[in-house]
Each structure stands twice: as structure tokens, then as C-alpha cells.
Image (tube, helix red, strand yellow):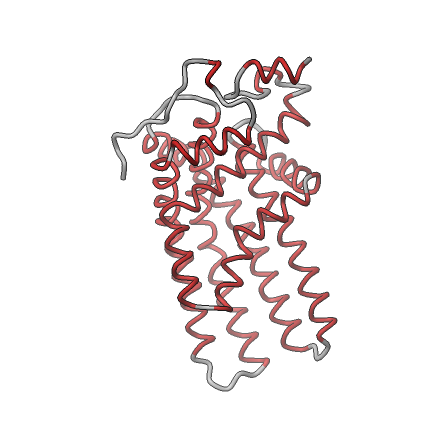
Amino acid sequence: MFKHKALKVNKEDASLPKNRKELFLTVLKDDFYLLSELSILLFLFSLPLAGGFTFELTLLARMGEVTAQKFFSVCFYSALIEIPLWGVRYIGRYAAFGVMKHRVHNEGGYVKELFFEGLKKGALRGFLIGLFFGAIAFLWQIGCAFLLSVSDSALWKGLGVGGVTIAFLIVFAAVECFLAGEQFYELSFFGSLKNGFSFALASFPASALHFVLCMGVPLVLTVVSYYSLIGVGLVWALWGDGVTVLAATLYSHRLFDKYINSVYYTDYINKGLSREEKERKDG
């Protein structure tokens, strides 16, 4: 790990990014170590889940004669086992959002220390939201497996799988907003989750895009090519997962400014951006 690395703090207001798109590009360009370290930390917390996925794919590959009953059974029990493994992954993701909040707000600190502070603060909440997401992932997987196993109609298969996938992506986006909001506001667990669903529905196109990049692409690669999945997985583990945290943080902060901070926490509006941008927005 990059133990000596601290988050970059820009003390000159005029040189701060003027908007969040510019901030996103700035972090991509200047903070490779941050995105890489967060990705590696998230990979460590994701190893149990990766093991569960590998076991499931191995069972499906070695199933021999594929029957609807065998296919559904493998999907059912594998997804059930993976529920607590999602919880472990989201412990790390909770802490990663805390680190990224410091970066985009132009606040100092060392990545390692901030990450472990996040673990102390939110390990339980991270695990619980991971269990919730894992339960939804279980329902999505067995729902898709059931539809693909029992229906002979391509139309009904497509409509059914599309419907449960839309529900799944809304939950995914709500959980991402939950994680970002947890670093901002002191709310009950269910209050944060309720806000997450509100923001996910209010920004459905962006939620769908984020879901496709984070979940859809790896899923398609699983079907298309095992080796391409390994290649993308390596990029994700060494850099890409940190980028997903960055993107979700910045977009969530934009929603927070629009719907919450503009009314209740005006000092937070455009935090980490140039004051000139804030004055322009206010004017």
C-alpha cells in the first residue's frame, strides 16, 4: 500500500476545479495512487465474494447435462451463500466513500488512516447495507434463473428479466447514494436508505448508466469470454473500483446540493470547488 501518500490539498481557491466534471477529470489525472489504493483495498474486501462467484461459475461449467432444475438449484444456493459475502464487500466500500469524500472536498489526510477511520465508524452499517443488497441480488438472480428455466417464450423471458433487472439497478443506485450520504449526514439507517431510493429514482438515467458500467459489463463479459472477464477484473481490482467510488460520490454530492444542501446546509454547496463557481451558481 502507498503508506506515505496523503490526499492532495489545493490551498489556492482560484486553482480549484470549477465544477464536478472538471474535478472528476482532475482526480483521474492527478490521483492515480488514491484510485489504485482504494481499488486494492476494495479488492481485499471483495475476495470472499469473488470466491463465491468463481465457485458458482465452476459449478455451472461442470454441470454436464443442463436441466432447468439443476440450473435453478445452482443459482439459488450460490446466491444464498453470497449474501453475507456482499456484506463483507460493502464494509470496505463504506470506508472507501469516506476517503473519497475527503478528497473531493479538498480536505487533507492519509488514505490508509482515513480508510480505517471509516471502518471504525461504519463497519456495522456497511455490513448491513451489504446484506440488504446481497438479499436483493439473491432475489434478482433466482428471479432471472426461474424465468430463463421455465418460460419457453423469448418475449416473456426478455420482459421478465428486464423488469427484475430494472428493480435491481434502482436498489444498486440507492445503496450507492446511501454510502455517499452516510459520509455527509447523521441519519438513522433507514432514513439514509430512504434518501438513497429517492435520489436513485430522481436520477434514473444516471443510475442506469452507473449500474451498466459497474454490474452490467462484468456480467456480459462472464457470458462472452472468461479471459476478458479476468482482464477487466484485474483493471477493476487495481484501479477501476476506485473510479466507481469517485463517480458515485461526485454525482451524489450534486444531488445533495440540489435537494438538501440548498435548503438545510448551504455551507456544503459546491464544497471542494472554486468559490467563483459557487458565486456564479448562487447568482
Number of residue marks: 0
Which residue reaches farthest left? 4
The x and y percentages for residue 117 are 38, 31
- Residue at 47%, 75% (x, y): give it: 60
- Residue at 67%, 26% (x, y): give it: 258
The x and y percentages for residue 195 are 65, 35
The x and y percentages for residue 220 are 53, 63
Quadrant of the drawing holding the C terminus: top right
Q: Is residue 264 above or below residue 230?
A: above
Q: Is residue 22 above or below residue 43?
A: above
Q: Quadrant of residue 153?
A: bottom right
Which residue reaches farthest bottom? 65
Quadrant of the drawing holding the N terminus: top left
Q: Is residue 136 left or right of residue 80?
A: right
- Residue at 36%, 27% (x, y): give it: 7
Q: Quadrant of residue 19?
A: top right
Q: Is residue 175 left or right of residue 63?
A: right
- Residue at 39%, 20% (x, y): give it: 9
The x and y percentages for residue 231 are 39, 59
